[in-house]
Image: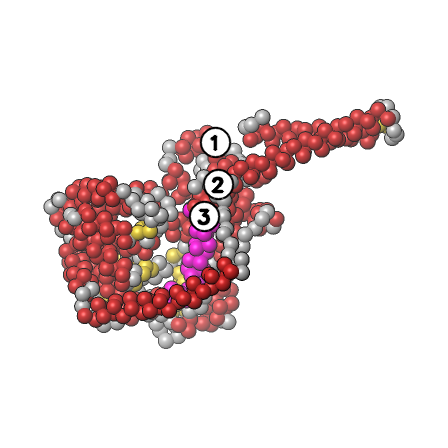
Amino acid sequence: MLNIGKIGVIGRTYRHLNRYRKILRVLFRYGFGDLVDTLKIEQYLEIGLQVISRKRREKIEKLSRPERVRMALEELGPTFIKLGQILSTRPDLIPVAYVEELSKLQDQTSPVPYGEIREIVRAETGKFPEDLFASFEPVPLAAASIGQVHRATLEGGENVVVKIQRPGIRKLIEVDLEIMLHLAGLMERHLEGFEIQRPTRIVEEFARTLEKEIDYRVEAAHMARFSRQFADDDSIYVPGIFEELTTRRMLTTEFIDGIKASRIDTLRERGYDLTKIMQRGVDAVMKQVFVHGFFHADPHPGNILILPENVVCFIDFGMMGRITGREREDFSDFLVQVVRGDERKAADAAMRLSHYDREPDRERLERDLLEAMETHLYHPVEKLRIGKLLQRLLEIFTRHSLSLKPDLFLTMKALATLEGLARTLDPDFNIMEHARPFVRRIRSGRFSPGHVADDVLETGAELYTLIKEVPSELRAILKQAKEGKIRIEFEHMGLEPVLFTHDRTSNRIAFAIVLAALIIGSSLIALSDIPPKWHDIPIIGLAGFIIAGVMGFWLLLSILRRGRM
């Protein structure tokens, strides 16, 4: 597991201080000095502040805040890029404008020297690449922030690609996560409303997600499960995995020599059937979402290759989505009611798909849904864009404080991405027509005898368990009451800024008292004419005045910097 923990004084170690210095510089560079000031990291201001030319400052000021956040994350490196990518799938945590911008994050960087890659392969397998493979290309095919990909050939002649993790990436991630946890704690303490959203919990969840991403065995497991889902479908291909050459920091898979789905002209020139490719790709994603509940969460053109005989091949299984049977039913209901234009039932389904602290205004929610449906659905088929409709619906969810479940957002995002790709192959493509039989199967299957019997048995088992546990739970409560052990706990919220101000005021008063005592004591020593002396002034008294002067200026500068006298 990633070794992270809360750190009281962030700069107590060199590795934290050095990294923190860079983070603060980037925040200032992209115009987030106000955030640094609000978080009260004044002890690091001198470290992070740097001069920015007027020309660059004017250029940055023209950018929107979401754009500046994206650029800052890209400059801060792997951990922050991954954080942005994960947040781009969480509209329940950040505004829609940030979701859209963070989805543009680029994860490309300069490659690691082959000598370092060679050492990692030896550390993982006990052999150098030249001893492990018949051939191994030292120049990578691609390089990202977490790892890079090399072509190789096995002793048996099979062509493979080897994904290898960058050296030292785990330690860098741990340092960044510790700093993130520290900043998240400051946000909870100093930013109004953030004590409810709990940024520290978000960082801890992010750490768990990142732990899986830097373990290539997890991606190998994703590929194996995905392959089993389409084992009987000759139109879909999944690269093979070489388990004996796969470890935590190294993933070896079959090399696929295909054509990217976005290269329409090349596909057409080589005689591929674009309509068949589109139908197979769409059906594959529909099966993933509505049948298996385990789907490729990023089906963009770069992750889909076309093979001979119009076979569709999916690659890069780092980001996968999961949707339960109940969520599939609710999502199907939502799509059906949206297409039908029934705002009341669509609102019911929307609430089942979401988390919320308090029930929204139903009348306003239904009115907003109806307006969105009227705007997007009553157009000719060739002009209908389900991606734009889903984006509008997401905005409505956010406006009414409905937090869409993360994997359901991934589902909507995957369908919108799929629609864009399919329309490049067939401009008249209508995703709802392709989704209809899958949605119908889910809705009809809900009332099948087997499904109903399972629901009845499950409900009965839960009811039996509840009835069985109530007496013992009630007996325990009564026993605690009788013994006087029942406690009622109160948790104060929103008092942290007041407590911080109180502590700062107390410190300044104590500082001022010490300063006054030092001045008085130095005056008495100066008047006592005690040697040693300098120009007939006792040196001890003079030193006291100098120290008092420094302390006085320090206190004055601190007050002025805070903007309050």
Q: Nearer the viewer, mark 1 or mark 2?
A: 2
Residue at (23, 64) in percent of width and height: 291
Q: Nearer the viewer, residue 395 or 231?
A: 395
Please state which of the two labelled residues, at mark 3 or mark 2, is closer to the viewer.
2
Residue 199 marker:
3
The residue pinned by badge 2 equals: 494
Q: Is tag 1's residue or tag 3's residue first in the polypeptide sequence?
A: 1
**Which contiguous range is marked in magenta?**
197-221
Say if 230 sits above or below 82 in the image: below
Residue at 23%, 42% (x, y): give it: 363
- Residue at 47% x, 61% y is 478
Element type where label 3 sits in the image: helix
Q: Residue 102 placed where, x, y %? A: 36, 46
Quadrant assignment, res 434: bottom left
Instruction: For the residues labelled 3 and 2, say whether their Cβ atoms are less than 8 Å apart.
Output: no
Residue at 21% x, 57% y is 332
Q: Give the percent coordinates (x, y) of residue 94.
A: 37, 45
Residue 49 in view in this figure: yes
- Badge 1 crowding class, 10 Å Cα cut-off, few under 14, some 14 to 19, many 20 or more, is few
Specify which label sits upstream in the sequence, 3 or 2: 3
Nearer to us of marks 1 and 3 is: 3
> Mark 1 falls on what kind of element?
loop
**In the depicted structure, whether residue 482 falls above or below residue 33:** below
Secondary structure category for the residue under label 2: loop
Percent x, y of residue 116: 50, 60
Image quadrant holding the C terminus, namely top right
| Above or below, 210 relative to 347 | below
Return the mark for residue 53: 1
Q: Is residue 226 left or right of residue 167?
A: left
Q: Mark 3 Cα within 10 Å, few/some/many (few <14, many 20+)?
A: many
**Does the magenta stretch mainly form a helix, a strand or a loop?**
helix
